[in-house]
Image (cartoon, rainbow, N blue to C red):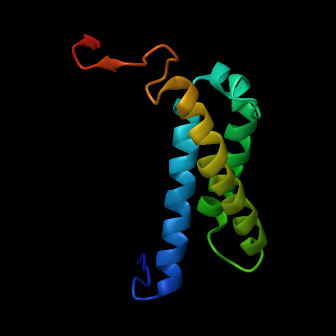
Amino acid sequence: MLYFDVLNPFWWIATAIIGFKAFAFIDAATRREDAYRAADKKTKPFWLVVLGLALGLDLLFGANPITGFLTLIGLVAAIVYVVDVRPAIKQLTDGRGSGNNRNTGPYGPW
């Protein structure tokens, strides 16, 4: 029988951390590779490896005393990506994946 202690607040915190890391990894995977270089940030493969390891270790080992420190390091990496790298890339690509969509509405340029 698989049992999750949903009344335990640490279970909710661990679930939120894993969700946040998954969001950062998926967002990094969907961004264009040249936008990372244009924003003068690390490369896309670097962020995919760092965020993928952070997420993978949490999914594989969960929250235990051995990986607790690694969980915090991965959380810091995900926070750095979301707070620093993601806004820089979105500013260059206008949030749509290409850099030349400025002043464009749903029916064309305005």
Q: Is residue 61 above or below residue 34?
A: below
Most extreme residue toward the bottom is: 7
> Residue 11 location in percent, x, y?
50, 79
Q: Nearer the viewer, residue 101 or 13?
A: 101
Q: Name the quadrant containing residue 67.
A: bottom right
| Location of the N terminus (image quadrant) | bottom left
- Across and down, in percent, residue 15 comes to 49, 69
Q: Is residue 8 left or right of residue 85?
A: left
Residue lying farthest to the left in this orientation: 107
- Residue 78 at x, y percent in the picture: 64, 54
Q: Locate the C terminus by quadrant.
A: top left
At horizontal 53% and vertical 33% (from top left) the residue drawn is: 90
Q: Nearer the viewer, residue 16 or 76?
A: 76
Q: Is residue 84 above or below residue 106?
A: below
> Relative to residue 107, is residue 30 depicted above or below?
below
Q: How many marks?
A: 0
Residue at image coords 63%, 62%: 58
Residue 28, quarter of picture: top right
- Horizontal relation, residue 61 to residue 70: left or right: left
Does residue 99 sit above or below 59 in this rendering? above
Q: Position of residue 103 (x, y in %)?
A: 37, 19
Which residue: 43% across, 19% down?
102
